[in-house]
Image (cartoon, rainbow, N blue to C red):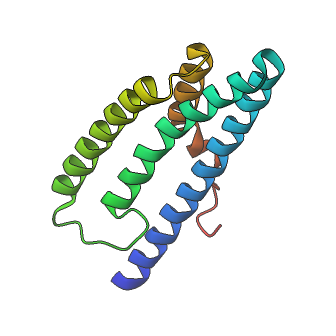
């Protein structure tokens, strides 16, 4: 019984992560299209950089927390703290890297894309099926 519950929970988390990624990629593509129409290729690159600064730390967090695998809950708080600290550190490093190595030509598009991708996480629960068997 415990194994079945753990397997179901892992499948549910995987579905959530996939839907979140799809929603974030759709937001990124829409932002890239809007940036292309408004500012040509420079705007598209700014949107792409902003989305990557948001997506890469999130991927690190998901991997570090073991969200996609059945894990024991005995050290969940420790994993959460380490994953969140690593995500924050990676986010700061990516911001510094982007602004030093490849400054975005349009910071407005960069920050809009970053905020849109980060806030997509709040909207994704609406994409989850209401049926427990779906």
Which residue is found at the position 47% from the left and 36% from the top? 53
Vertical position of residue 6 compared to residue 35: above or below:
below
Q: Residue at left 43%, top 83%? A: 4
Q: Residue furthest right?
A: 37
Q: On the image, which quarter does residue 110 sit in?
A: top right
At x 23% / y 66%, what residue is drawn? 73
Q: Quadrant of residue 33?
A: top right
- Asked whether residue 1 is in view, the answer is no
Q: Is residue 80 visible?
A: yes
Quarter that holds the N terminus: bottom left
Q: Position of residue 104 (x, y in %)?
A: 56, 22
Q: Residue at x 44, y 67 (%)?
A: 68
Classify the position of the C terminus by image quarter: bottom right
Q: How many marks?
A: 0
Question: 10 or 69, which lies in front?
Answer: 69
Q: In terms of depth relative to the viewer, which is nearer, 71 or 2?
A: 71
Q: What residue occupies the far front of the structure in this picture?
A: 101
> Where residue 83 appears, x then y in whole percent?
27, 50
- Left or right side of 26 for 82: left
Q: Is residue 134 found left or right of 7 in the rendered image?
A: right
Image height of 59 relative to 98, above or below: below
Vertical relation: 14 (above or below) 96: below
Image-based side of 65 in relation to 76, left or right: right
Q: Position of residue 55 (x, y in %)?
A: 50, 43
Residue 17, horizontal then vertical, whole percent: 53, 56
**Is residue 28 depicted above or below 22 in this figure?**
above
Residue nearer the viewer, 33 or 132: 33
């Amino acid at each position: 019984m415990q194994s079945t519950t753990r397997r179901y929970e892992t499948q549910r988390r995987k579905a959530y992560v996939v839907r979140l990624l799809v929603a974030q990629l759709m937001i990124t593509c829409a932002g890239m299209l809007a940036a292309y129409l408004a500012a040509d290729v420079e705007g598209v690159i700014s949107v792409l950089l902003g989305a990557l600064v948001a997506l890469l730390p999130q991927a690190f967090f998901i991997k570090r927390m073991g969200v996609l695998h059945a894990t024991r809950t005995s050290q969940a708080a420790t994993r959460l703290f380490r994953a969140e600290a690593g995500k924050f550190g990676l986010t700061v490093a990516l911001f510094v890297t982007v602004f030093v190595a490849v400054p975005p030509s349009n910071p407005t598009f960069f920050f809009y894309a970053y905020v849109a991708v980060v806030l997509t996480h709040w909207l994704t629960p609406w994409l989850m099926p209401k049926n427990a068997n779906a």
